[in-house]
Amino acid sequence: MKPTVAPFPAARLRRTRKSAAIRALVSQNGLTPSDFIWPVFLRDGRDVVEAVPSMPGVNRLSVDKVVDAAREARDLGIPAICLFPYTDPAKKTKDCAEAWNPDNLSNTATRAIKDAVPDIAVMTDVALDPYNIDGHDGFVENGEVVNDRTVEALVKQALSQAEAGADIIGPSDMMDGRIGALRAALESAGHQNVLLLSYAAKYASAFYGPFRDAVGASGALKGDKKTYQMDPANSDEALRLIQRDLSEGADMVMVKPGMPYLDICRRAKDLFGAPTFAYQVSGEYAMIAGAAERGWVDGDKVMLESLTAFKRAGCDGVLTYFAPAAARLLNG
Ligand code: PBG
């Protein structure tokens, strides 16, 4: 569509900006707490609220505390909470068996939340990195992150999450063929209503640093993730990945990181019209929260502006560590 603009003075475009009332009337995109998925970090123990130093305002929570967080989310109107376990280094192994332990931290938290706050959607993460002695999302054999054997393990992990009551499963591993394999396994295990939110376009990004600290993966990771996560220089490839994952049975797709990749969000939404999410990742959060802490930017305003930008770029929702703070502001 080519915008046509009448010549001045017939068109004074400032007219539609003249007052708060008129601006509200012509506003194209809005933000509500129902746009958010709140990612939370889990930790062993009871009554634990442990600060993540590189993410001011974000804590690792024990299961009892994450149940409180789920209640808070529900009361704020946030529809979903996403669980990321911090794994004790002693539980990281070469075979990653903790990933499909029915009683691992993520599954225990899922059951506790679904018991206490059944109306909130629980999203879980499928990838081996929290449990892998090599720190990678897949098994490492002879220095290579292997695809097909990893997919078999991801299936076991996802089934244990569905069994625990997860509503949305988020494969963040970037292996080929995992969406099809997960969808088939969920169907045959009677979990046909479990949603798959595929991290379809996930970039090999330097913005994940604080997250790796938060889940205790920084020390473990050998090398980088460039053989499976995308090159930040590419965009057509993101569309091929999204198309592939939708055709294999993904219900929703994700672009990650968020703010530096709004062009991908827009192209994906325009082309496929599928439910599209962005992950405003840990490094994006840290930049805003860190600058706000120093008084260099107005944290609340920058937060809401950054979240509105996702909606403008075509996203239906955002995974954001700001979810509770933004919801509190939006609820007035
Ligand atoms: C790994 C995973 C990562 C994030 C979510 N899942 C990090 C990575 O790929 O190394 C990052 C999220 C964030 O930075 O907030 N499966």
Image (cartoon, helix red, strand yellow):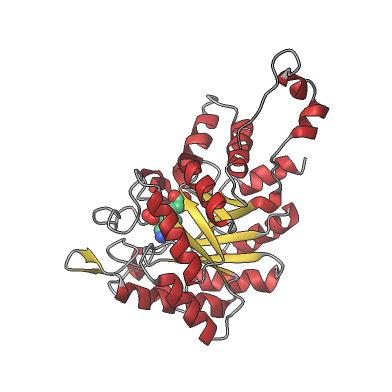
Q: Is residue 55 shown to the viewer in this render?
A: no
Q: Quadrant of residue 131?
A: bottom left
Q: Quadrant of residue 21?
A: top right
Residue sitting nearer the eye, 119 or 306: 306
- Percent position (x, y) of residue 5? 67, 24
In the image, taking residue 311 as reference, residue 211 lies left or right, namely: left
Q: Is residue 211 shown to the viewer in this render?
A: yes
In the image, taking residue 78 as reference, residue 211 lies left or right, namely: left
- Specify the farthest residue to the left: 142
Residue sitting nearer the eye, 114 or 137: 137
Q: Is residue 35 above or below residue 97?
A: above
Give the residue drawn at x 77%, y 40%: 332
- Quarter of the image for the N terminus: give it: top right
Q: Where does ligand 1 appear, by image quarter?
A: bottom left
Give the residue drawn at x 29%, y 66%: 133
- Percent position (x, y) of residue 271? 53, 53
- Specify the farthest residue to the right: 21
- Percent position (x, y) of residue 295? 55, 25
Residue sitting nearer the eye, 113 or 239: 239
- Specify the farthest residue to the top: 9
In the image, taking residue 164 as reference, residue 125 lies left or right, namely: left
- Percent position (x, y) of residue 104? 47, 73
Total numbered labels placed on residues in the image: 0
Give the residue drawn at x 54%, y 31%: 293
